[in-house]
Image: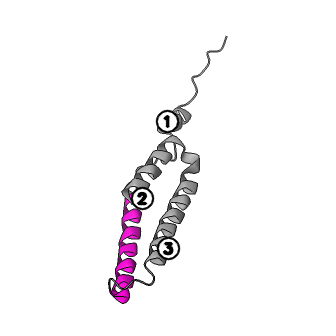
């Protein structure tokens, strides 16, 4: 999870236009990892399958909550402060000649 969040932050800083697409790709990869793990452990007798299912559900909910919290804490500017400050300044008055 932390590697994906790191990559998402890095992408947001370098290429903000692909931030949403990268977030969706990260979600898809995480979903595929869980699906593959569940497929591999489908017929195992090493542990109780019911308790494993509840553990996966709990871990997924914690995972999503942690990503939500981290995303809300990220400071991603959607307006460039320097450009916005320059736009608010009035144009210098020209002297009549």
- Are the residues at dot 1 and dot 3 in contact (C-beta closer than 8 Å)? no
Residue 12 against residue 39 in the figure, above or below: above
The residue carrying mark 2 is: 71
Which stretch did the figure color magenta?
A: 47-70
Residue found at the far top of this picture: 97
Percent position of residue 75, x then y: 41, 49
Q: Quadrant of residue 45?
A: bottom left
Q: In the rendered structure, which disc, 2 or 1, sits on the residue that comes first in sequence?
A: 2
Dot 2 or dot 3: first in sequence order is: 3
- Does 50 lie within the magenta span? yes
Residue 46 at what x, y percent from top left? 33, 82
Q: Which residue does the image show at 55% across and 30% down from the upper left?
A: 90
Question: Which residue is disc 3 drawn over?
Answer: 35
Residue 88 on image: x %, y %: 53, 36
- Tell me, for residue 85, which label it has, or none: 1
SS of the residue under disc 3: helix
Mark 2 element type: helix
């Amino acid at each position: 999870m932390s590697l994906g969040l790191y990559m998402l932050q890095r992408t947001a800083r370098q290429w903000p236009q692909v931030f949403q697409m990268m977030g969706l790709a990260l979600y898809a990869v995480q979903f595929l990892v869980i699906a593959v793990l569940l497929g591999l452990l489908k017929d195992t007798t090493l542990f109780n399958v019911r308790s494993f299912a509840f553990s996966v559900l709990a871990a997924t909910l914690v995972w999503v909550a942690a990503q939500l919290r981290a995303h809300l804490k990220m400071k991603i500017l959607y307006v460039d402060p320097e450009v916005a400050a320059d736009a608010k300044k009035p144009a210098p008055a020209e002297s009549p000649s």
